Image (spheres, grey):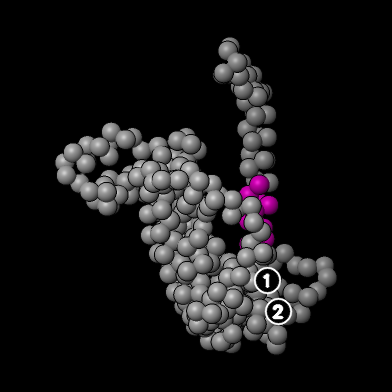
Amino acid sequence: MSAATRTLVSPATLARPRGRAVYWTVFTAVVLLFALAFLFPVYWMVTGAAKSPDEVAQTPPTLVPQQWHLDGYTDAWDLMQLPTHLWNTVVQAAGAWAFQLVFCTAAAYALSKLKPAFGKLILGGILATLMVPAQALVVPKYLTVADLGLLNDPLAIWLPAVANAFNLYLLKRFFDQIPRDVLEAAEIDGAGKLRVLWSVVLPMSRPVLGVVSIFALVAVWQDFLWPLMVFSDTDKQPISVALVQLSQNIQLTVLIAAMVIASIPMVALFLVFQRHIIAGISAGSTKG
């Protein structure tokens, strides 16, 4: 057996009934442990919202609610004004996603295929921003947004989201792997640079565009500090800020229910697009 085909368990061991039984027992136990480690916090949150306030605070805690109180979800929906704040979050996340996808894709295409002057120097400067802590940029960003009069405006979320060096580099690395012959064939047929980008590059880049889209949406959905600073108007705050601002006089079970509701859109987004996400990640790893 060559070194390239060596595995932790040899085929000879797997061929024996005892070896096969041990292998599948260990494999099943490991998978169940990992599944439990990831899913138990979600189960604890969902069932915690269905408990009474006294049961949530009691020690030792109960794994299953003694009585199911589903009114915590309806109370969270009404008392914490979740429809308003969820809609605010959707608007902010969708705008940031659209701006980021347009500008990062255009910049990555230019750096990858158009080869501008000082392109490597520009790319190096962009990647150098990844070394700067995000907290160090909060004050300059806030002063810029305030000077432009964008406080309490979705543009305060959309415009800073465009400057995402990681997503730009991810797109550029994917574009670098697109064969030059394909682009030259389109140019011979009379396609301009923008036509090549729209009709050739983007259709071939759907996996990485899906990954970048997920990164962009999740980043805005879970962000707390920046929306807290730029949205002083409570009616315009996203769900991440509203959960903290409105939790002062709210029962713990209602707050947990609100957290469950707030997490549903992102979980649903992943379940719907998980195939595209995994395809994008695997494509990036094989082509990089």
Three-letter amino acid code at the position of disc 2: Leu
State the residue position of label 2.
252
Q: Which residues are magenta?
A: 34-42
**Above or below 101: residue 121:** above
Bin the neighbour count of mark 2 within 10 Å (Cα to Cα): few under 14, some 14-19, many 20 and up.
many
In the rendered image, residue 168, in percent from the top left (x then y), is placed at: 47, 52
Mark 2 / mark 1, whichever is N-terminal? 1
Left or right for 101, reference 180: right
Where 169 falls versus 85 (above or below)?
Answer: above
Q: Is residue 120 visible?
A: yes
x, y percentage for residue 139?
64, 71
Q: Which mark is residue 48?
A: 1
Residue displayed at 28% across by 33% down: 181
Asked if the magenta segment contains residue 260, the reply would be no
User: For the N terminus, which image quadrant?
Assistant: top right
Q: Residue furthest left?
A: 189
Furthest toward the top, the residue is 1
Q: Quadrant of residue 55?
A: bottom right
Between 246 and 140, the one lying in front of the other is 140
Mark 2–mark 1 CB contact (< 8 Å): no
Dot label at residue 244: none
Mark 2 → mark 1, Cα distance in angstroms: 9 Å
Label 1 is placed on what type of residue?
Gly
